[in-house]
């Protein structure tokens, strides 16, 4: 059927296959090495996330500032000068490609504007 249906002997990969007490000795060695750390963790009170971050502030904040500074320096160093762009006024952008005087001359008056005069100046919107 399938070549992968055969069972492979994984015994040579298991260090405890020839030594029956290997895993017990391994477990006791790991636990003896971790005993001090486990005791310390049992003695400390449970900390909340803000408390842990507050404890890290001495290292975390300066490193974050350093990373942001380096990123800013690298970004400024790689910036290529683009084409010179000049600011365009809104009126210029609206009038580009439009022939004649698109903005009614009533807007150029220095006197107070009358709303009805503006609406009737173009010949439309008669009250």
Image (cartoon, helix red, strand yellow):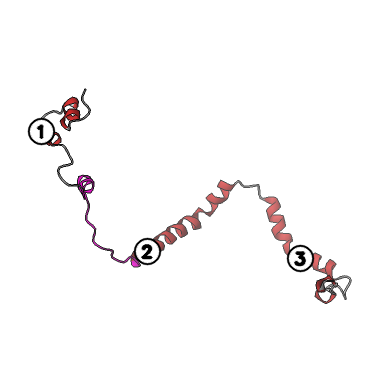
Toward which corner of the image does residue 31 lie, by quadrant?
bottom right
Q: Work out whether mark 1 precedes mark 3 in sequence or the reverse, and give the earlier one.
A: 3
The residue singled out by tag 1 in the image is: 110
Asked whether residue 64 is in view, the answer is: yes
Instruction: Check the image and report above or below for 28 versus 10.
Output: above
Viewer-proximal residue among 119 and 56: 119
Residue displayed at 82% across by 71% down: 2
Viewer-proximal residue among 83 and 127: 127
- Looking at the rendered structure, the secondary structure element under dot 1 is loop
* Quadrant holding the N terminus: bottom right
- Tag 2 near tag 1, CB within 8 Å: no
Q: CA distance from mark 2 to mark 1?
A: 48 Å
Tell whether position 90 is magenta: yes
Q: Residue 75 shows which numbered tag? A: 2
Q: Residue 32, position in %: x, y?
A: 77, 64
Residue 1 located left or right of residue 120: right
Viewer-proximal residue among 114 and 84: 114
The residue singled out by tag 3 in the image is: 30
Q: Residue 79, position in %: x, y?
A: 33, 65
Residue 119 located left or right of residue 43: left
- Looking at the rendered structure, the secondary structure element under dot 2 is helix
């Amino acid at each position: 059927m399938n070549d992968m249906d055969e069972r492979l002997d994984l015994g040579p990969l298991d260090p405890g296959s020839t030594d029956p007490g290997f895993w017990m000795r391994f477990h006791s060695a790991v636990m003896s090495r971790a005993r001090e750390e486990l005791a310390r963790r049992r003695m400390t009170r449970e900390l909340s996330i803000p408390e842990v971050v507050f404890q890290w502030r001495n290292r975390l904040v300066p490193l974050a500032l350093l990373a942001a500074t380096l990123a800013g320096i690298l970004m400024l160093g790689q910036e290529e000068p683009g084409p010179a762009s000049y600011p365009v006024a809104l009126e210029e952008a609206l009038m580009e490609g439009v022939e004649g005087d698109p903005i009614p001359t009533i807007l150029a008056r220095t006197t107070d504007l009358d709303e009805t005069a503006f609406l009737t100046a173009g010949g439309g919107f008669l009250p």
